[in-house]
Image (spheres, rainbow, N blue to C red):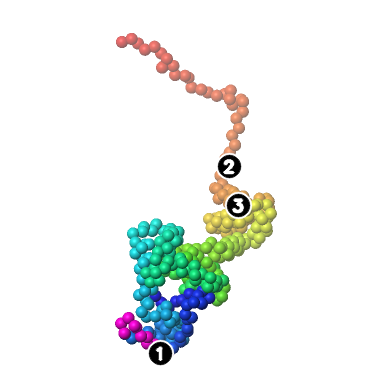
Amino acid sequence: MGLAHPHPSNWPESRPVPYQRCSKRPSTHSNKAGNRQTRIGAHAMGGRDVLSGRVFCLFAYRVQFAAQAKGRVENGVGYVKKNFLNGLEIPSFAAIHPAAIQWRDTVANVRIHGETHQKPIDLFTQEKPRLRPLPVMPYDCAVVRPIGANGCCHVVLDTNRYSVPHIYASQKLTLKLYPDQVLLFHHETLIATHPRCYDRRQKISNPDHTRDLLAQRKKAREQTLLLTFLALSAHAEAYARKLEDKRLNSRHHIQKIVALSEIYGPEKVNRALQDALAFEAYGCEYIANILEQRERPEVSPGALHLTRRQDLLELELPPADLTPYEPKPNP
C-alpha cells in the first residue's frame, strides 16, 4: 500500500500524530524483523520528482506505516479476498455493495481480531466519539490532462470519440477523467459532460453541440438558393416577394423553380417568370405549366370541311352482298 492517509480531521486523538517529512535525500529506516536497512527513495518519502522537477512532501506515520507493518496491513486485503470474495459470483458491481455491508456487519466486525483480541465493532465504538467529521467538499480524484479537439468537434479518448460544441473545434482543451464521466474544459469553463464509455471505437455525441452548426448550415443553404433564384431574372425579386405573401412554403417553390432552370435554361425561365407575374400566377406549378406548353410542337391548322344536308341525300352506297344468306345446296 502507498503512503496515502485519511483526512487529518478523522485521525483519533489517542493515536500518534502524523509528521510531515520533506527530504531531498533517501531516508533509511531500521527493520526490526530482520535487522535489515530499508532504503526508501526520494520519490516515495518526499523530495524532487525527476520527471516534473517539482518538490513535494508526503505524510508518513511513525507507527502505522512502519516498514515492518507493511505485511500486516496487506493481510487485511487478503482476508477480504479469502473470506468475502472467495467463491462469490458477482453479477454486477451494484450487487457488491449490499453484500459487503452484510458481510461486514455479520462476519468481519463481530469476530475476535487476532492482533487486538477484541471485536472490531467494540473498538470502533470506543474510537467513534474521537472521530471528526469528514470535509464538506470531497477530494477531487480526477485525472487531468490536456487534449485537443479535432475538426469534427470531437475529442478522442481510448479510441472513443466525445463531442464538444462546434465553436471549440480544433482547439486545445483540458480533460478531467472520472471513473463514470468525462468532463471537458476550455480554460476554466466547463463545455461538455459525457458518461464515460469503456467500449472501443464508440461515438458519444450530444445533439446540443451541433444544433447551432446545423442551423447555420441550413441558413447558408437557404441564402445560396435565394441568390441563385435572384440571378435568374430581373423580375425574380418581385416574384419571390409575391410567393412569400401568397404561398405558405415559399422556399419549396423557389427550389423547384431553380431546378426548372437547370432543365429548360435560365432564358426560358426568365420569360416564364415575366408571364407569371403578368397573369398573377404565383407558384412553381404555374412556371412548370408555362414552360411545358411552350415546349410542345405547334400543329398547323388544316382546311375545315362542313357537311350539308343536301350532300347527305346524294350519297351512293354499294349494293348489299346477300351471298351469305343464300341456301346451300344439299350434297
Assess whether residue 210 is covered by the magenta stretch.
no
| Residue bearing mark 3 | 284
Q: Which amino acid does label 2 sit on?
A: Pro
Q: Which label belongs to residue 89?
A: none
Q: Which label belongs to residue 301?
A: 2
| Residue bearing mark 1 | 25
Helix, strand or loop status at disc 2: loop
Q: Is residue 189 above or below residue 217?
A: below
Say which label, 1 or 2, has the lower sequence index: 1
Q: State how far apart marks 2 and 3 are (Cα).
A: 32 Å
The N terminus, quarter of image: bottom left
Q: State how far apart marks 1 and 2 are (Cα).
A: 115 Å
Helix, strand or loop status at disc 1: loop
Q: In this view, does 191 lie to the left or right of 71?
A: right
Q: Is residue 267 above or below residue 35?
A: above
| Residue at the limit of the structure toward the front, as seen here | 117
